[in-house]
Amino acid sequence: MTGAAAEPTAAAVLGTGTGPAAAPPRRDRPQWTGMARRAAMFALALVGVCALWEAYKAVGSPDGGTVLGVRVLPRTDDTSMPHI
């Protein structure tokens, strides 16, 4: 295809047009929202790790788990895994 129809317009090349090639305007958020989200995710991850710790302590064997005589899982007594 040749001719004027095959040539891109200057607005399409530069990305300054209002057609489909133009990106939607970006909403800038305050910097503290990103930091607050990061802090909330860190707290959520910490709570999740603590929940997994306590769940394993509740259902795990006090002597630990062994496979072919080799200890694989930690003991769940109060000395090895204290409550959080």
Image (tube, rainbow, N blue to C red):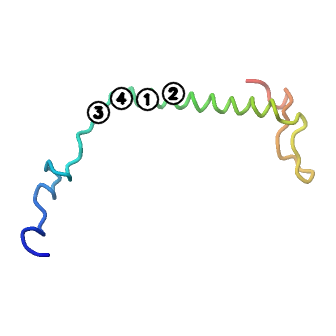
Residue 40 is tagged as 2
Q: Position of residue 76 (x, y in %)?
A: 84, 33
Image position of 41 with respect to 8: above or below: above
Q: Residue 14 occupies which quadrant of the picture? A: bottom left
Instruction: Name the quarter where the C terminus is drawn.
Output: top right
Q: Earlier in the sequence, mark 3 or mark 1?
A: 3
Residue 20: x and y, percent? 20, 52
Q: Amino acid at mark 2?
A: Ala
Percent from the top left, x then y, of residue 77? 86, 30
Q: Quadrant of the N terminus?
A: bottom left
Q: CA distance from mark 4 to mark 1?
A: 7 Å
> Which three-letter amino acid code belongs to the residue tagged 4?
Gln
Work out whether 51 lies above or below 5.
above
To which residue does mark 3 refer? 28
Q: Secondary structure at mark 4?
A: helix
Quick check: 18 above or below 54?
below
- The residue sitting at 41% across, 31% down in the picture is 34
Label 1 crowd bin: few (<14), some (14–19), many (20+), radius 10 Å: few
At 80% from the left and 31% from the top, the residue drawn is 57
Above or below for 38 versus 24? above
